Image (tube, rainbow, N blue to C red):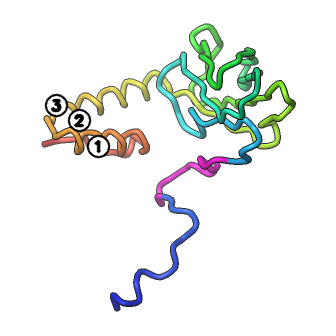
C-alpha cells in the first residue's frame, strides 16, 4: 500500500552492472582524501588531482603504480599530474596518496584511477559525438552524457534519434 511507503532505504545504491567496489564518498574529514579523479577511468593523460582541503600550509601528493612514481609539493588542494611525461599504462591502476605538512595522510586508505586505452578514448569520443548530434535539450544532453561517462561504453548501444 502507498501509505506504507517504499520500505527501508538501502545504505548504498549501486547499479547492478557497476564494477566500482571502492567508495566514492568522503572519508575522514581530518585527512586530505582524494576527491577527483576517484576510483574511475580517465580520458586525459594530464589531469587535475583534487583533494579534501584541511587548511594545511602544504601538501605532498604522490601518484604511483605501473612503473610510475611521481610526487609534487603544493600549497593548494589540487595539482596537475603530467601524465603525458609519465610511462602511463592504459588499464593500470594508479594510487594517490596525499600527506599534509601536519602529518595527516590518506595512506591508510589509498584510492586512485585508471587510464582508458586509446581505443577506449576514441569510443567515448564517438559516443559523445553521437549524443551531441541528437540536438537534445540541455538537460537531456547532460543526462545522456552522465550515463555515458558512468557506463562501460563497450556494452552501450549506439545513441540514435
Residues shaded magenta: 15-26
- Residue 17 lies in the magenta-colored region: yes
Q: Position of residue 103 (x, y in %)?
A: 87, 31
Element type where label 2 sits in the image: helix
x 34%, y 92%: residue: 1
Q: Which mark is residue 144?
A: 1
Residue at the disc numbered 2: 131
As rendered, which of 76 and 108 lies closer to the eye? 76
Considering only order in the chain, which callout, 1 or 2, is on the residue closer to the N terminus? 2
Left/right placement of residue 159 relative to residue 109 reads left
As rendered, which of 107 and 31 lies closer to the eye? 31
Q: CA distance from mark 3 to mark 2?
A: 5 Å
Is there CB contact under 8 Å for labels 3 and 2? Answer: yes
Crowding near pointer 3: few (<14 within 10 Å), some, many (20+)? few
x 25%, y 28%: residue: 129
Is there CB contact under 8 Å for labels 2 and 1? Answer: yes
x 32%, y 39%: residue: 145
Crowding near pointer 1: few (<14 within 10 Å), some, many (20+)? some
Residue at the disc numbered 3: 133
Left/right placement of residue 143 relative to residue 133 reads right
Q: Position of residue 10 (x, y in %)?
A: 54, 71
Considering only order in the chain, which callout, 1 or 3, is on the residue closer to the N terminus? 3
Left/right placement of residue 98 relative to residue 93 reads right
Amino acid at each position: 500500500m502507498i501509505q506504507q511507503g517504499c520500505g527501508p532505504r538501502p545504505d548504498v545504491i549501486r547499479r547492478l552492472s557497476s564494477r566500482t567496489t571502492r567508495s566514492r564518498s568522503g572519508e575522514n574529514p581530518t585527512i586530505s582524501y582524494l576527491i577527483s579523479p576517484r576510483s574511475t577511468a580517465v580520458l586525459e593523460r594530464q589531469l587535475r588531482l583534487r583533494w579534501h582541503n584541511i587548511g594545511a600550509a602544504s601538501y605532498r601528493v604522490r601518484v604511483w603504480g605501473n612503473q610510475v612514481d611521481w610526487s609534487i609539493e603544493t600549497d593548494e588542494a589540487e595539482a596537475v599530474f603530467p601524465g603525458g611525461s609519465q610511462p602511463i599504462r592504459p588499464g593500470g591502476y594508479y594510487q594517490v596518496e596525499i600527506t599534509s605538512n601536519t602529518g595527516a595522510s590518506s595512506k591508510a586508505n589509498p584510492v586512485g584511477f585508471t587510464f582508458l586505452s586509446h581505443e577506449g578514448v576514441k569510443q567515448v569520443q564517438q559516443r559523445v559525438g553521437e549524443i551531441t548530434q541528437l540536438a537534445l535539450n540541455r538537460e537531456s544532453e547532460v543526462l545522456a552524457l552522465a550515463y555515458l561517462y558512468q557506463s562501460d561504453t563497450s556494452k552501450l548501444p549506439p545513441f540514435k534519434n
